[in-house]
Amino acid sequence: MEKSEFILVHMIMASSTILPAFLMHFIDIDEPNKLVGYRTKWSMKSEETWKFAQKYSSKLMWWAAAISITVQIFSVFIFERETSIIVAVAVFTVAMMAAIVITERQLRLRFNKDGTPKSNEHEDLI
């Protein structure tokens, strides 16, 4: 892989890492839809679950993006070109999967199966 291709791949990866976090944070979607936002079975149960999932996952996506880009920068200096790309993709994938798993867990802790809030005891964790 040539240096220009290598740089382009990392720039595309950095952009695609930031894009989900940016969209989740800055696009305000008040009700569940099938086009934009954090869309899972649990997040689309009610308007309350939808709003919580958007806000909560947005914060986790920013952390996932920050971790991914940090690892990506360091991997460029530590590993061979192809290996640094593989490491960056792996970290990005794990970070995004962790954000989804954590958000889903919080939805189950805070909401009943019908999408109604269980209580306000977890409200301060948002």
Image (cartoon, rainbow, N blue to C red):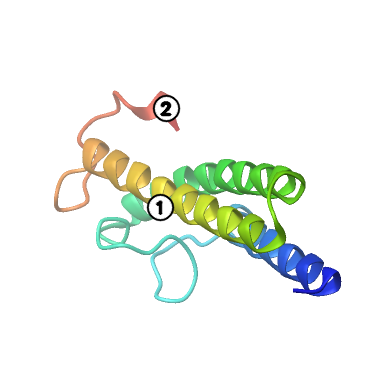
- Crowding at dot 1, Cα within 10 Å, few <14 / some 14-19 / many 20+, comes out as some
What's the residue type where badge 1 is placed?
Met
Q: Position of residue 101 (x, y in %)?
A: 33, 47
The one of 64 and 49 positioned closer to us in this rendering = 64
The one of 122 and 103 positioned closer to us in this rendering = 103
Image quadrant where one finds the N terminus: bottom right
Element on which disc 2 rests: helix
Q: Is residue 24 visible?
A: no
Element on which disc 1 rests: helix
Image quadrant where one finds the C terminus: top left
The one of 77 and 17 positioned closer to us in this rendering = 77
What's the residue type where badge 2 is placed?
Leu
Q: Specify the label residue 125 is tagged with.
A: 2
Q: Mark 1 — residue?
A: 97
Q: Is residue 11 left or right of residue 67?
A: right
Farthest residue toward the right?
Answer: 4
Taking the spot 46% from the left edge, 76% from the top edge, the residue there is 35
Nearest to the eye among marks 2 and 1: give it: 1
Q: How many marks?
A: 2
Q: Is residue 52 left or right of residue 80?
A: left
